[in-house]
Image: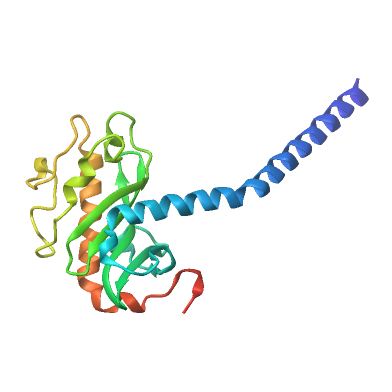
Amino acid sequence: MIPSMKKNGLLLALFGIACAGVVALTYEGTKSQIAEQQRRQLMNTLHQIIPADRYDNELYNQCLLLSSPQYLGSKAPQPAFLATKNGEPTAIAIETTAPDGYNGDINIIVGIDWNGEVLGVRTLSHQETPGLGDLIELRRSDWVLSFNGYRLENEKDPRWAVKRDGGEFDQFTGATITPRAYVGAVRKVLNYFNRNRDTLVNAPRCGGES
C-alpha cells in the first residue's frame, strides 16, 4: 500500500508541476497584451480628464514619479502625467490613493489645471461594495464629475468634505465612508499640487529617465 501511496503522490506532484508550467507559459504569452491594454485604458482616462486643447505633447510619455505618503496616500512613488503646450506646463494628472476606503485602497487619478482647478477625476481601481461604494465609478454614477471646476481656496477649505461633515459633496445613501475617503484624497492631491507646483517639472521621470 505504501508504494502505491508514493506512486500516487509522485503523480500528483508531477501533475502540479505541469499545471504550474502551463500557467507560467500562459502568463508569459499574454503579459505583453495585458500591459498594452492597461496602457490604452490609462491613455483613454488621461484624455478624459485633461481636455485636448490644453496640451500638444504625448501625455502618457511625459510621466513623472511623485513621492508624498502624506498627500498621495502611498509610500511608493505615484505616477503623474504632465501636459504642456509650446513647452510650458498647462495641466497635470496625478495618481493618488485613498487608503481609508470601506474595503481598502481606492486608487484615483486627478486632472488639475496649472492654476489649481480640477479638470476631471476618475477611479482607477477599488474594492468597494457593489451597489453602494462602487458609485465612485463613472459607469455607475456621475458623482465623480462633481469635482470638475473646484479648486482649493486654502488648506482647510471647508467645502472639501461630504455634506454630512459640513462640506459640499454628496455622500451615498447607506455609504458615507467611501465618498468621505475619496473627497479627502482629492483634497490632499490639490494640497500637494499647490505646495509643489513650481518644482513638479523637475520630479524624477518614470523608468528612470532624466
Rendered position, 35 above or below 172: below
Q: Position of residue 145 (x, y in %)?
A: 20, 46
Q: Residue furthest top?
A: 1
The answer to which of 37 and 97 lies nearer the viewer is: 37
- Residue at image point 33% right, 66% down: 68
Left or right of 21 in this view: 87: left
Q: Quadrant of the N terminus?
A: top right
- Residue at image point 21% right, 41% down: 143
The answer to which of 100 and 169 lies nearer the viewer is: 169
Rendered position, 127 above or below 38: above
Q: Position of residue 158 (x, y in %)?
A: 8, 54
Q: Position of residue 88 (x, y in %)?
A: 28, 77
How many numbered circles are shown? 0
Left or right of 15 in this view: 135: left
- Residue at image point 18% right, 30% down: 173
Q: Position of residue 199 (x, y in %)?
A: 29, 78
- Residue at image point 60% right, 49% down: 31
The answer to which of 114 and 208 lies nearer the viewer is: 114
- Location of residue 15 (image quadrant): top right
Asked which colour scheme the image uses, the reply is rainbow
- Location of residue 130 (image quadrant): top left
